[in-house]
Image (cartoon, rainbow, N blue to C red):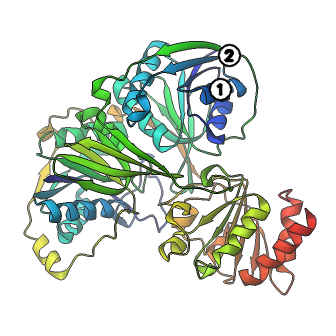
Amino acid sequence: MNIVVLVKQVPDSGLARQLDAQLRVDRNGANNVMGELDEYAVEAALQLKEAHGGEVTVLTLGPGQATETVRKTLAMGVDKAVHIEDEAVGGSDALATSAILAAALGRLEWDLVIAGAESTDSNMGVMPQLLAARTGAPALTGARKIDTDGSTVTVEHQRANGYDVLTANLPAIVSVWDTINTPRYPSLKGIMAAKRKPVESLTLADLGVAAAGPAAAWNEVVEAAARPERAAGQIVTDEGQGGTALAEFLAAEKFI
Amino acid sequence: MTDILVYVPNSGKHAAEVLTLARTLGDVSAIAFDDAAASLAGEYGAAKVYRVEAPGADDYFVDPKATVLIDLARSANPGFFLLPSTDEGKALAARVAVALDNGLMTDVSGLAADGTATQDAFAGATVVKSKSTKGFTLATVKSGATEPAPAPGSPAVETVNATVAEADQRVKVAQRVDEPAGDRPALSEARIVVSGGRGVGSAEDFALIERVADSLGGAVGASRAATDAGYYPHKFQVGQTGTTVSPQLYVAAGISGAIQHRAGMQTSRVIVAVNKDADAPIFGMADFGVVGDLFQVLPQALDEIEKRK
């Protein structure tokens, strides 16, 4: 079973993030890490490989510094990587990105594509369905459990008030939530081995994608501003009447 | 007026919000796959309802409905096509965008008549205004974007008969499992949310959080620290990797307010915090905060709430 895992390097969501002067995600001033949900996708792929054999390829689109994220997945146990790196890519929206990724998927042999349920920078959560529409493969999104018998895939699609069991024939595209597994840490051996694993670097020209970036995007950001600071609230220290004060506040705000 | 297409799922406050917002932009044509959705559309001011009969569509995931929506959008050529920002709404919108080579914006919190959408980026730290440059304005609207306001009417009903093509039978829904939510409102749609964090300390003590939520008629939430520790089920997690909420009132008890959590509740209208650490970041965003032991403060607040009811 050959699996392609989609990963995206994103600014660390635990630190302050901002847009740059072109109103794009500022990736230069940020501490960049692998998307928080992506490592669950990597782990899911590695577990399926361990059960069914085959090869796991990581596919990413991003600037040179995304190599760090690629290396981390290789250290976790991914076999090889494809890194699409092209200056023209900057400023691409989700639709433009999906066209590029679909072109790359067209060059790879895969039974399954696994992605995180959403990226942790733009949080759109639409890439699996965009890729399904572009590649013709079925998308089974938001999985909290994944299983395959080699010819079909079955997932538990997480909903707010339960789950749906979805099945489809391979090849298929699956996205996963962080409820699905506990990602492994790279071992020292894995980190050493990662240095010798193949990383293929591709440009848009290699993929035959003519247009990318803001000019080819389907949407544009018109303006952006920091959210106005919330007015400082009233903070009291409990000296025996804190609960009563809280209830009084709720009553004054008409929540009681 | 501009024609506004709205996909209406069969229930919920969220769908009512999307219809309410859509009404401010033009005449609403709602797409309903069942009677419940059709009546919700009528109650919230739709001028027209496309009542879709697609036998067997529910046996498959996303694809059959996507095909119907794509066909309706192509023939209606609306000014706006709005869907709720749910898993289903986003999936359908993505399919429409690719099929019609149309722009797509997700999780919008506001829309202007010229198609400019307001979105929260980076956990609500940045407010972004965006526009689609191709096609009509296709957007999913986040929960809590507006207060639902009924406007009952008698919409014109057009029946749309659809069959499920073989190509749309690729992902089969083999089983639907509902996990009982109890009597509390759904987390993503609740007007009031009461959440507990690491400071609650145990699964047993989450009963206190539940009592406060029930007393206020709200939903229960939990921080990632609390769900990771097993204090409360993951599906109630509020935050970056959980549910995003935007209630009128958010009560955070024993939650420090890490960015991962703030991502899920930053746009709440009123925020109340109880934490024993006076330096907890949650106090920086609270409208009202009590520095103290939540096991002292909340029971006392509960007594006072019950007295005042």
B38 and B48: which one is in front?
B38
Check disc 2 and give the amino acid type: Pro
Extreme residue in the bottom direction: A239
What label does residue A89 carry, if any?
none
Instruction: Judge whether A183 appears above or below A117 on screen.
Output: below
B251 and A163: which one is in front?
A163
* Quadrant of residue B57 within the rendered picture: top left
Disc 1 and disc 2 in contact, CB within 8 angstroms? yes
Residue A234 point in image, percent of width and height: 80, 71
Residue A224 point in image, percent of width and height: 54, 46
Residue A78 point in image, percent of width and height: 17, 64
Real-space Cα separation, disc 1 to disc 2, in angstroms: 8 Å
Q: Is residue B139 left or right of residue B95?
A: right
Rendered residue at 47%/68% (across/down): A15
Instruction: Report the residue marked by disc 2.
Output: B155
Check disc 1 and give the amino acid type: Ala
B201 and A196: which one is in front?
B201
- Position of the C terminus of chain B by quadrant: bottom right
Q: Chain of mark 1?
A: B
Within-10-Å neighbours for mark 2: few <14, some 14–19, many 20+? many
Q: Is residue B280 left or right of residue B229?
A: right
Instruction: Report the residue marked by disc 1.
Output: B41
Rendered residue at 72%/58% (across/down): B218
Instruction: Judge whether A1 appears above or below A246 on screen.
Output: above
